[in-house]
Image (cartoon, rainbow, N blue to C red):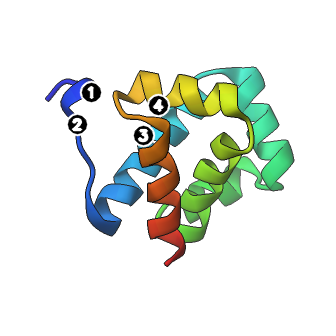
Amino acid sequence: MPAAEHQDTGSDGAASLALRALGWVLADPARAQRFLDLTGLTPDGLRAGLAQPATQAAVLDFLAAHEPDLAAAADALGTDAARLIAARQELAA
């Protein structure tokens, strides 16, 4: 399914979207380093916490805190910024 048609619903969808967003974050070394610096995560800590909703939410928090990244990630993932924010709220619930 092309990314533009990919729709995530429910908490499983939110987790999937967060992990896809993480892939986008990590694709750029400078952005990846900024993510680690701002979240306080280490590469090992990030790997260990991938399945944790708190870690997934941290990815979406990172994007939400910088609107240009939020918009660019939404575009790259074939979704919209509001869906990324909604996914963050689902993970926090």
Given this view, does label 1 or label 3 mark the residue nearer the observer?
A: 1
Does label 3 or label 2 sit earlier along the sequence?
2
Q: Which residue is mark 4?
A: 74
Give the distance between the C-alpha atoms of the residues marked 1 and 3, in whole angstroms.
10 Å
Up-down: is 89 above or below 7?
below
Task: Give the structural element (helix, strand or loop) at label 4.
Answer: helix
Q: Which residue is mark 1?
A: 3
Residue at image coords 79%, 53%: 39
Task: Give the structural element (helix, strand or loop) at label 3.
Answer: helix
Give the distance between the C-alpha atoms of the residues marked 4 and 1, in whole angstroms.
10 Å
Q: Which residue is mark 2?
A: 6
Q: Is label 1 in contact with label 2 (beta carbons under 8 Å)? A: yes
- Residue 43, horizontal then vertical, whole percent: 70, 47
Task: Give the structural element (helix, strand or loop) at label 2.
Answer: loop
Q: Amino acid at mark 4?
A: Ala
Which residue is nearer to you in this view: 82 or 93?
Answer: 82
Given this view, does label 4 or label 1 mark the residue nearer the observer?
A: 4
Q: Which mark is residue 73?
A: none
Q: Amino acid at mark 1?
A: Ala
Does label 3 or label 4 sit earlier along the sequence?
3
Give the distance between the C-alpha atoms of the residues marked 1 and 2, in whole angstroms.
5 Å
Task: Give the structural element (helix, strand or loop) at label 1.
Answer: helix
Residue at image coords 26%, 58%: 9
Q: Which residue is mark 3?
A: 20
Give the distance between the C-alpha atoms of the residues marked 3 and 4, in whole angstroms.
10 Å
Q: Quadrant of the N terminus?
A: top left
- Residue 40, horizontal then vertical, whole percent: 83, 55
- Residue 63, horizontal then vertical, whole percent: 64, 41
